[in-house]
Image: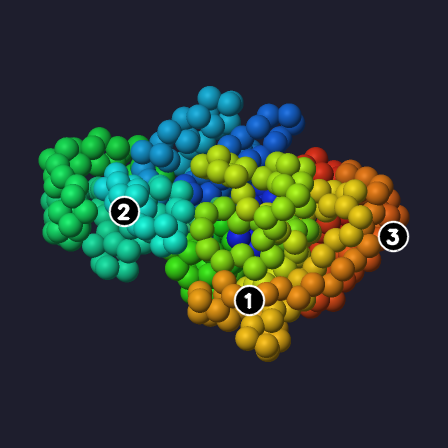
Amino acid sequence: MANVVVVGAQWGDEGKGKIVDWLSSRADVIARFQGGHNAGHTLVIDGKVFKLNALPSGVVRGGKMSVIGNGVVLDPWHLVKEIASIREQGVDISPETLMVAENVPLILPIHGELDRAREEAASQGSKIGTTGRGIGPAYEDKVGRRSVRVADLADRATLESRVDRALTHHDALRRGLGLKPVDREALIQSLLDIAPEVLQYAGPVWKVLNEKRRAGKRILFEGAQGALLDIDFGTYPFVTSSNVIAGQAATGTGIGPGAIDFVLGIVKAYTTRVGEGPFPTELDDENGNRLGTRGREFGTVTGRKRRCGWFDAVLVRQTCATSGVNGISLTKLDVLDGFDTIRICTGYELDGEMLDHLPIATEQQIRCVPVYEEMEGWSESTEGARSWNDLPGAAVKYVRRIEELIGCPVALLSTSPERDDTILVTDPFED
Ligand code: IMP
């Protein structure tokens, strides 16, 4: 029995939904371990489309347990709305099938307001391009030791003192940004109103996961965003506010690192990014437009157009290392069908020197000039291929070259959004 972590190995939007759904159909427990409702996971099951932000993908499948770990930040109003909308689609969600860790910090309306006010106030070039959902300010409060956590909802006096602690900080900040002070009574009342709905799901996720593990159950840790948005290893400060890399699956749920048997990195056959920040292989030309149009590259949460570029092997080699990726799932290869030539970035040139990794300073990151290797394209369609033999020779060469350059094998190759259009090389649960 194996426990598998799925992480995005680029800037998010690698097509995790389909793979996570396939793996979750074979897992017993599905756990979210970081991020919040900034994630947009679309699942298509028997023709029905489910859109999830905060809930683990397992909720849409019967007989599974889904958990939201302590590494997540949770907007309780969004959670309740999301549960209601999934229920409307005929899915049963109950405290037997969903557990929220008692130590999850809450995202409050003041976090969203602060997130948006800061973005508005930031000058061009310093905007992060956040989803505006309060993710960053909620994590700031967590490490600032002034969060309201799920368990605090159970007792009015505790809740009031936690809110007061947070407001001492927030009201000062808001004054500086020209925002009105927080209406304390209204905030407390709205938290008390939502409390019973959230508390029915609250529980010790760390304990349940450890028990499930001992009982030989399969756990799938479902990552959101991508490793290049990681707060430590991403393109800081143009990142999200959580650790996104695979190690977070352990600290974000309370299971030891030894419980992780396989890390699957999801990798798109080219590169995209939503929001601001360095992107060495970005294409501001016809090829970039073509990738965006063919790949339908629009954000699921904000609807923003994604920036597109060639595959960057330097960055994926780096994220495979920082997440200890055992195998990758390569997605959206078919978007490259019909290009005469395709480029892969194999290194950067900076101030006359060759680099085999992305330097940490933003100022250097934006000056890195990608060094490309050009490969022959293919005119045949790869969409829907289910075996290596179905792929044109040039496409196989492209995939093999990616494996070589990133130093990690392909475990799965996804050739369309359909579940069966997948070439399986290694089953992460059986490896
Ligand atoms: P935040 O997570 O809302 O603070 O946004 C920080 C950065 O992460 C922005 O560039 C967002 O566009 C990006 N981001 C956050 N969530 C996702 C996601 O699920 N997919 C892709 N990018 C994301």
Instruction: Residue 66: tell me if it is visible.
Output: no
Circle 2 is placed at which residue position?
Answer: 121
Above or below — where is 176 with respect to 347?
above
Q: Amino acid at mark 3?
A: Gly
In the figure, residue 150 lies in which quadrant?
Answer: top left
Tell me the CA gap for discs 1 and 2: 29 Å
Q: Callout 1: helix, strand or loop?
A: loop
In primary-sequence order, the first of circles 1 and 2 is 2
Q: Callout 3: helix, strand or loop?
A: helix
Circle 3 is placed at which residue position?
Answer: 393
Answer yes or no: disc 2 within 8 Å of ligand 1: no
Residue in the picture at 69% in, 63% down: 372
Characterize the local packing of mark 3: few (<14), some (14-19) or many (20 or more) Cα atoms within 10 angstroms.
few
**Tags 1 and 2 touching, CB below 8 Å:** no
Answer yes or no: disc 1 within 8 Å of ligand 1: no
Tell me the CA gap for discs 2 and 3: 51 Å
Characterize the local packing of mark 1: few (<14), some (14-19) or many (20 or more) Cα atoms within 10 angstroms.
many
Tell me the CA gap for discs 3 and 1: 32 Å
Q: Callout 2: helix, strand or loop?
A: helix
